[in-house]
Structures are given as C-alpha cells and as structure tokens.
Image (spheres, grey):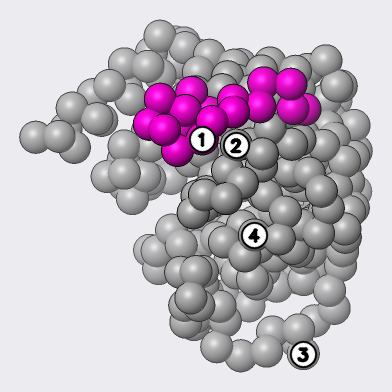
Amino acid sequence: MALLSQTQVRFYEDNGYLVIPAVLQDNELEPVRRVITEQVDREARQLYAEGQITDLHEDASFTRRLMEVYHGLKRRSIGWNKEVFSQEIYDLGMHPAILDIAESLVGPEIQFNGDYWVRTKLPNETVTTFPWHQDSGYYGDPTEPYHLLSLWLPLVDVDEHNGCLQVIPGSHRWGLQPVGRDEDGHHRPTEDIETRGRVETLPMKAGDMFAFHNLTFHRSLMNQSDGIRWSIDLRYSAIGVPLEWLFKAGLNGFIAQSAAHPALVDSWEGWQAKRRMAEAARSR
C-alpha cells in the first residue's frame, strides 16, 4: 500500500482525522481475532473453575461468546492490553500498510506507543460507550503540545446500531478542553462542544482505519446490537516524543521504524524484554 496522498494528509491536518478504507484484508485481521478468541477462552475457563459459570459457551461465535460468558455476572471491561500482549499484536503494529500511514502522518522515525487496546464493546454497556473526549485528556496535560496518532481498526463492520464512532472535524485546533467525570469514570467536557462544530458519524467496514489526533474530539455510540463490537486501536508518535505516563503503567512500546538508525528497530523479543523490565520496575 502506498503512502497517503497529499490530499489525504492535508485532510488529516485540517480536520484532525482521516478514514482510510480497506487498509487490511479480512485474512490479515484473523491473527488478532485468534488472540482475542484465546483470551475469551481463558476468561471463560477461569470463571468456570471459580464456579461463577456452568457453561463455557464454546460453540458461541466470535461476536457472542464473551457476552454469553458474562451473562448474569457483574463483569465490565473497557478493553484489553496486557491480556492480549502477543507477537500477533507486534506483527499488526509493524504491518507495512499501517506503518506507511503512520509515516505519512508522524514522519519516518516512528515509535509504537504501547497503549494499544482491544475494545470489548458488549451490547448496551455504558462503560464502553465513551462520551465526547480528547485522548490527551486521559494522557495528561503535558501531552497537549505533542502529536500522538491513534489508528482505530474495527474487527467487525460498524454502524450506528452497534456503536460506531463519531468525530468533530477541526476540534484538534481547540486546545485541551476542561472536563469532568461521569459515573463510569469517563471524561466529559464541561461545555456542550457540539455547538462549536458539526458531528460526523463514521460507519466503517472491518479492515478500514480511522486515524485521529490526540486533541480531536470523538466518541463511540452505544452498542444496541445482539453481538460484541470488537475493535483495536494502535498508537504511534515520532521517536523522541515523551511517553513517561505509559512507562509508569508498564505499557512500554517499541521502536517500529527508523530511517536514520534502522538498528534501533525492536524485534518481538526486544519488545517482550522492554515489557518485562517495565513490570519488574513497577513491582519494586
């Protein structure tokens, strides 16, 4: 896949987001779906061993099994990171088409930030229905001057019914806005930001990509379907952008591409070592 066109890059710079269709084919999504399936199975078997469920629901589909396993339990999950840490996630983060897009938007010296998330968006679940927010609101005020690129990929087709995303074009130019918190712990802006710009709704196909800036206001709608809206978001920045808040959480990333110093690019084994060192430091 070629680098983004100048028109696409200009659209991103002007609007703070870009939707890129058909970045990955369905078979290229399968390794990540397999990792998710394995984690769902671990969750089911742990709950079964604890006596919290009596059925593993092994015959349920990819979009229904976790929902069936959690049925009747007070289980809520915003997303998975360490639960799905794997070479498959590393390989996705290093996919040439994805790195091409990252290079077009952050430059050729690229770090994978480490705070990827598989989103477990169950039906009618408020905790995974994020209100309007800017990612830097969660990262912290010191990140406002930096460009932290998010690349969101749906693993199933998404629309208004199962909880697609919405965005306010140009809102990345507003600066970091003040927020409060709701009952789920989500950030909510203290003003009605919809009065400041138009809302774009983003139905997408599995394998499409939504790229957006850390100051761009976006939200996800409620999943009103009868299945899970699985997705994964990856984050990138230019090498040298500080990521201390991630290191403190043990979410170390890796050097994904360097034209100036290609020997710095981390292997899967190198990323594993960084994560182990981060966990060891946190446990001291």
Which secondary structure, mark 2? helix
Q: Based on the displayed image, in which of its 4 quarters is residue 251 positioned? A: top left
Q: CA distance from mark 1 to mark 4?
A: 20 Å
**Distance between the alpha carbons at the discs numbered 4 and 3:** 27 Å
In this rendering, position of residue 49 left or right of residue 279: right
Q: Which mark is residue 53?
A: 1
Of the numbered discs 2 and 3, the one sitting upstream in the chain is: 2
Instruction: State if disc 1 and disc 2 touch (CB < 8 Å).
Output: yes
Residue pictured at 47% horizontal, 28% vertical: 48
- Mark closer to the chain start, 2 or 1: 1
Would you say residue 84 sits in the magenta stretch?
Answer: no
The amino acid sitting under disc 1 is: Ile
Q: Do the residues bearing badges 2 and 3 touch, measured as CB atoms within 8 Å?
A: no
User: Mark 3 = which residue?
Assistant: 195
Q: Position of residue 247 (x, y in %)?
A: 31, 40
Residue for point 64% across, 59% down = 125
Q: Which residues are magenta?
A: 43-61
Quick check: 218 above or below 255?
below
The residue lying furthest to the left in this view is: 284
Quadrant of residue 105 within the rendered picture: top right
**SS state under label 3:** helix
Label 1 SS: loop
Q: Is residue 260 above or below residue 221?
A: above
Label 4: few (<14), some (14–19) or many (≥20) C-alpha neighbours in 10 Å: some
Q: Earlier in the sequence, mark 1 or mark 3?
A: 1
Q: Which mark is residue 125?
A: 4
Using the numbered discs, state the Cα–Cα distance from disc 1 to disc 3 in whole angstroms: 47 Å
